[in-house]
Image (spheres, helix red, strand yellow):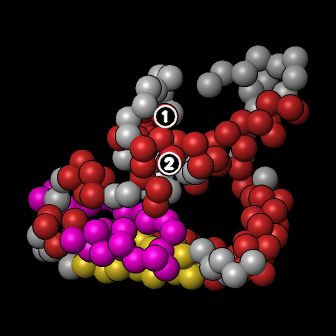
C-alpha cells in the first residue's frame, strides 16, 4: 500500500463553513471576535500570510487589524505593540508574523503575549499545556489552559482526527 499525503486543503471548506456558523452565532449574541497581527518589516512570506489572514478574517466576519512596524523597529517597540494589543478589549487573538528581524528576540516578544490571546501556542503556558501533564501555573494560566485552544493546535488535531477516521487499518506515520 502506498503512502497517502494528508492535505488539509480538502478539509478547509468544511471547517470554514463550521467556523463561519460559530462566528455568526457569537455575533448574534453580541460578541465580535477580533484578530490582530504584528508585522515587522515586510518579509515576503510574512506578507503573503498576512494577506491570507486578512482575507479569511473578512470572509468569516472577524474584526481584523494589522500593526505594521518598520524593519528597524526596536525590540521594545515590538513588545509595546504586542502589549497594546494585549490590553485592547476588541482584540481576542494576536498573531506575531515571522520571521522577526534578527535584532528582535522572538522569546521576548512571546513573553509579552497574553496566553488568552495567543492563537499560535507560542507562550510558555501553551508549551506546558501541549507537552507534559502540566501542574498548576497560576490562576490566569490555568484559565487559559481550560478555556481556550489555539488555532495551530486545533488545526492539527482536527486534521489528524478527520484523516485518522478514514485511515483505519492503515499504518500512520506521524
Residue 118: percent from left, percent from top: 44, 56
Give the vertical position of 94 relative to 32 (above or below). Answer: above
Residue 91: percent from left, percent from top: 47, 74
Q: Secondary structure at mark 1?
A: helix
Residue at (72, 55) in percent of width and height: 9
Give the vertical position of 149 relative to 49 (above or below). Answer: above
Quadrant of the image for the N terminus? Answer: top right
Q: Which mark is residue 129?
A: 1
Residue at (79, 24) in percent of width and height: 2
Side of 78 relative to 34 (left or right): left
Side of 48 relative to 5 (left or right): left
Q: Is residue 113 magenta?
A: no
Q: Secondary structure at mark 2?
A: helix
Disc 2 to disc 1: CB gap under 8 Å: yes
Give the vertical position of 165 relative to 123 (above or below). Answer: above
Q: Nearer the viewer, mark 2 or mark 1?
A: 2
Report which quarter residue 73 is drawn in: bottom left
Residue at (38, 57) in percent of width and height: 114
Q: Which mark is residue 83?
A: none
Q: Is residue 84 magenta?
A: yes
Report which quarter residue 104 is drawn in: bottom left
**Mark closest to the chain's N terminus, 2 or 1:** 1
> Is residue 165 among what the camera can see?
yes
Residue 38: percent from left, percent from top: 35, 71
Q: Residues within 10 Å of mark 1 (few under 14, many from 20)?
A: some
Q: Which residue is mark 2?
A: 144
Q: Residues within 10 Å of mark 2 (few under 14, many from 20)?
A: some
Segment tinted magenta in the rendering: 80-103
Quadrant of the image for the C terminus? Answer: top right
Number of marks in the rendered image: 2
Amino acid at each position: 500500500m502506498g503512502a497517502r499525503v494528508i492535505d488539509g486543503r480538502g478539509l478547509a471548506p468544511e471547517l470554514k463553513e463550521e467556523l463561519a456558523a460559530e462566528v455568526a452565532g457569537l455575533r448574534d449574541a453580541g460578541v465580535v471576535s477580533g484578530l490582530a497581527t504584528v508585522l515587522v518589516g515586510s518579509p515576503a512570506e510574512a506578507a503573503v500570510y498576512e494577506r491570507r489572514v486578512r482575507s479569511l478574517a473578512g470572509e468569516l466576519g472577524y474584526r481584523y487589524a494589522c500593526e505594521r512596524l518598520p524593519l528597524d523597529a526596536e525590540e521594545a517597540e515590538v513588545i509595546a505593540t504586542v502589549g497594546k494589543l494585549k490590553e485592547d478589549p476588541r482584540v481576542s487573538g494576536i498573531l506575531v508574523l515571522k520571521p522577526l528581524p534578527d535584532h528582535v528576540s522572538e522569546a521576548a516578544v512571546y513573553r509579552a503575549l497574553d496566553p488568552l490571546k495567543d492563537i499560535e501556542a507560542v507562550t510558555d503556558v501553551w508549551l506546558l499545556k501541549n507537552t507534559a501533564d502540566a501542574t498548576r501555573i497560576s490562576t490566569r494560566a490555568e484559565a487559559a489552559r481550560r478555556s481556550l485552544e489555539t488555532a495551530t493546535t486545533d488545526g492539527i488535531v482536527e486534521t489528524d482526527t478527520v484523516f485518522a477516521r478514514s485511515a483505519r487499518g492503515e499504518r500512520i506515520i506521524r
